[in-house]
């Protein structure tokens, strides 16, 4: 459980209203749009960069994001491009996805026919992956690094393109976050249940040091030996405890 709420400077995407040159509208969305309408990722990155003392100007971050082609007219903001933006400012950054099962159900079933039993199995695996993701968020936040993550907006509308927010804490029963779409968007709260219902199970992690983002090695012990999987992924055998 995260034991603190990170003190992250708040930035609102509405501050991009003065930026000229409207974005190409995402597929399926009609009407005129501005970067203030589609700037959730830019405001979120600006909060992260400001927190780490790198940049506090959303218009500058937008320009860098467009250089890295981080915006796609059909898909919206691309997490791979957002990672490049953060790295260009000297931060260690990576993206995580705990919904890799989506669209790959047939490969997971490996020839088994879909039925009620496999449907329940897939549901269990999805919930396990979301739980693993939530624990990762808790760990990174407890190390003092805020997290950009994607949620459905409107709340729970899984047909939407998604929306970026900045997590500040994952507490026992609530999450605390900055909502860049609102002028009064600082330090909002959702219950864990509401967050999981609207979370896209993806995130962009960033910090001033790479070790902040690296999770601890996995240890598997037996009576005679210990298998340790270090951060480089190569297993090593050590004599077991007697």
Image (cartoon, rainbow, N blue to C red):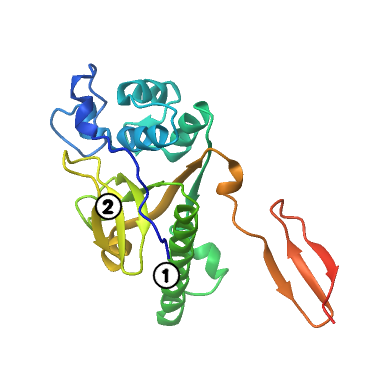
* Residues tagged 2 and 1 counted as in contact (Cβ below 8 A): no
Locate residue 127, reporting x and y percent: 42, 70
Which label number is shown at residue 62?
none
Locate residue 47, reporting x and y percent: 35, 36
Secondary-structure class at tag 1:
helix
Tally the marks. 2
Which label number is shown at residue 127?
1
Q: Residue at x 51, y 26 (%)?
A: 88
Q: Quadrant of residue 175?
A: bottom left
| Image side of residue 205 versus residue 12, left or right | right
Furthest toward the top, the residue is 20
| Image side of residue 45 versus residue 101, left or right | left
Q: Residues within 10 Å of mark 2 (few under 14, many from 20)?
A: some
* Relative to 161, residue 26 above or below: above
Q: Residues within 10 Å of mark 1 (few under 14, many from 20)?
A: some
Sequence-wise first label, 2 or 1: 1
* Relative to 102, residue 78 above or below: above
Q: Residue at x 45, y 56 (%)?
A: 137
Q: Residue at x 53, y 74 (%)?
A: 112
Q: Which residue is mark 2?
A: 152
Cα separation between marks 2 and 1: 17 Å
| Image side of residue 54 versus residue 62, left or right | right
Q: Residue at x 39, y 23 (%)?
A: 66
Q: Quadrant of residue 65?
A: top left
Locate residue 29, reporting x and y percent: 19, 38
**Quadrant of the image for the N terminus?**
bottom left
| Image side of residue 182 versus residue 226, left or right | left
* Relative to 118, residue 64 above or below: above
Secondary-structure class at tag 2:
loop
**Quadrant of the image for the C terminus?**
bottom right
Locate residue 195, reporting x and y percent: 30, 61
């Amino acid at each position: 459980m995260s034991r603190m709420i990170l003190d992250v400077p708040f930035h609102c995407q509405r501050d991009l209203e003065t930026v000229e040159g409207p974005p190409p509208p995402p597929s399926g969305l009609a009407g005129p749009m501005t970067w203030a309408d589609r700037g959730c990722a830019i405001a979120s990155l600006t909060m992260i960069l400001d927190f780490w003392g790198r940049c506090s100007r959303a218009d500058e971050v937008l320009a860098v994001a467009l250089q890295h082609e981080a915006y796609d007219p059909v898909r919206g903001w691309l997490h791979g491009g957002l990672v490049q933006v953060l790295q260009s400012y000297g931060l260690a950054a990576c993206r995580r996805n705990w919904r890799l099962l989506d669209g790959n159900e047939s490969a997971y079933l490996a020839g088994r026919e879909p039925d009620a039993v496999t449907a329940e199995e897939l549901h269990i695996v999805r919930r396990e992956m979301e739980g693993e993701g939530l624990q990762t968020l808790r760990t990174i936040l407890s190390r003092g690094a805020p997290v950009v993550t994607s949620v459905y907006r409107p709340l729970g509308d899984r047909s939407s393109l998604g929306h970026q927010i900045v997590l500040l804490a994952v507490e026992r029963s609530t999450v605390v976050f900055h909502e860049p779409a609102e002028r009064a968007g600082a330090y909002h709260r959702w219950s864990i249940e509401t967050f999981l219902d609207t979370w896209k199970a993806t995130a962009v992690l960033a910090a001033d040091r790479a070790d902040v983002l690296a999770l601890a090695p996995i240890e598997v012990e037996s009576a005679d030996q210990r298998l340790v999987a270090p951060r480089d992924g190569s297993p090593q055998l050590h004599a077991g405890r007697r």
